[in-house]
Amino acid sequence: MKTCYITTPIYYASGNVHIGNSYTTIACDVFARYHRHKGDDTFFLTGMDEHGQKNEEAAAKQGKTPQEYVDVIAEQTKAQWERLKITNDDFIRTSEERHKSIVQKIFAELQEKGDIYSGFYEGNYCVSCESFFPSSQLAENNSCPDCNGPTTKVKEKGYFLKLKKYEQQLLDHINNNPDFIQPETRKNEVVSFIKQGLEDLYVSRTSFKWGVPVLSDPEHVVYVWIDALSNYLSALGYKSDDDSMYQKYWINGDKVVHVVGKDILRFHAIYWPIMLMALDVPVNFKLYVHGWVLMNAGKMSKSKGNVVYPDEVIDLYGLDALRLFLTSEMPLGNDAVFTYKRFVEKYNFFLANDLGNLVSRTLAMINKYFSGTVTKPKTNLTDFDEDIQNVAKEVIENYYKEFDNFSLQSGINEIWRLISRANKYIDETTPWVLAKDENKKDELNCVLYNLFEVLRLVSIMINPVMPDASEKIIQELGLELEDINFEDLQFGVTKVGKVIEKPIVLFKRLNWEDEKQKHE
């Protein structure tokens, strides 16, 4: 059995997650569900980055300890993931002892090796982004290049991680592993950044206390990126009494995947592999880098007031519609734009017109013409049977290829290619005409059997993306949930199909003028 270890970045504990944050987690969940269906031993990790000056200050304003403050946010986030039906196997928090102890061991080892050294840092710091910036990277009026917020001049004694030392080794790794960073545009961006010359990384702070203390110098706390990035190993028990999961999923694992947004690319493509190189841990992960979910006014931002939260969408349109929209709108590496108008358009086109229409027409005809039962024909009987069966085989093959490579949008488009072909097949074969001729009964059964099989295949393939709709279609086909099985992902498995008598309408068409009023 192959293994798959997939991670989201751990999200900063700063309040409710919006659909931009949710995209990453949903996409990873789709990937994890897909691999479980394939039979892979899959471990899916998400979590929360809880330390730092920003949370220390926010807690003080509320009269809470930092731990009390982040505990509330952690529970809110877990509840949100549950509502989104995220199937993570673990939720790592940087304030947990199991994580802090490993961070301290990692920091100490890097000190002992001479890859972390003490010195003085002087530069500009953005509290909001928890990031330092040299003057060359600052925006107008010394503002933060990421959030455009103010920065403050900082000079303090601290510790640095040697990045320059591993510059060539990292370039060699990228060149020798062309699929290490995907898409290629992001890889090229990283290579260009490295070739400009890396500066050693400041990795401790003394201006706040809410963090992991450096064992040899407790006045210092380990700064965010060594602290946060280490979660990918600490959750597996690296450097703990039981490192069996680390051995299984990282050292001997078949697939290790980190999924991140483009805003944290350099931290995962440069700082993290260099940390691993310094620790003599194999850099055996793939990094998939996605864009942002944008609004018409640009990047989603609480300060701009243009944030859309998952619950708002789910309450009006259901979870499956949100999961499908986010995963099918985002080409890997590029941005996607969310507007309710676009959402409703896609809902109508993909769900009401295509999938919903195919389900309702097929089940209605099977019930009307054969009292709900179709049987597998001995041979093809219409001019169009072979073509739809071939399309199904092609789609299944492409579905595996695209989902294996985290090309979720392309994989979903393949599923809808089969759905569209099936709707066209109905128009080509005209079952309502065949039903008028008793001599065409076998031909009619053949057509409806083929449509039954298409729906069965579609219900299996959409399950990682739309678990609720998948299960409803399976039940309407008269099958069991156990039939959502990739071993049965081939055309013609069913001998006799018995659909339910009164299926429900899965997706009702929406009127934009009516929906528009809900969002004004």
Image: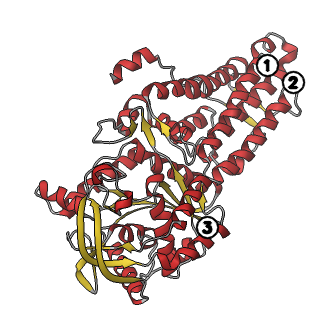
Give the residue at x 39% y 19%: 516
Q: Element at badge 3?
A: helix
Q: Which mark is residue 428?
A: 1
Give how far apart the Cα atoms at labels 1 and 2 are.
Answer: 10 Å
Whichever of callouts 2 and 3 sits on the residue coming sooner in the sequence is 3
Whichever of callouts 1 and 2 sits on the residue coming sooner in the sequence is 2
Which amino acid does the dot numbered 3 rest on? Ile
Residue 345 shown left or right of residue 14 in the figure: right
Q: Which mark is residue 382?
A: 2
Which amino acid does the dot numbered 2 rest on? Thr
Give the residue at x 85% y 17%: 440
- Disc 2 residue crowd, few under 14, some 14–19, many 20+, Cα 10 Å: few
**x%, y% of residue 4?**
58, 63
Q: Nearer the viewer, residue 132 or 68?
A: 132
Residue underneath mark 3: 174
**x%, y% of residue 41?**
58, 64
Whichever of callouts 1 and 3 sits on the residue coming sooner in the sequence is 3
Q: Element at badge 1?
A: helix
**x%, y% of residue 490?**
75, 44
| Residue 257 seen in the figure | no
Quarter of the rendering occupied by the C terminus: top left
Image marks 1 and 2: residues in contact by CB distance under 8 Å: yes
The furthest residue to the top: 436
User: Quarter-wise, where is residue 491 in the image?
Assistant: top right
- Disc 3 residue crowd, few under 14, some 14–19, many 20+, Cα 10 Å: some
Mark nearest the camera among 2 and 3 is: 3
Q: Element at badge 2?
A: loop
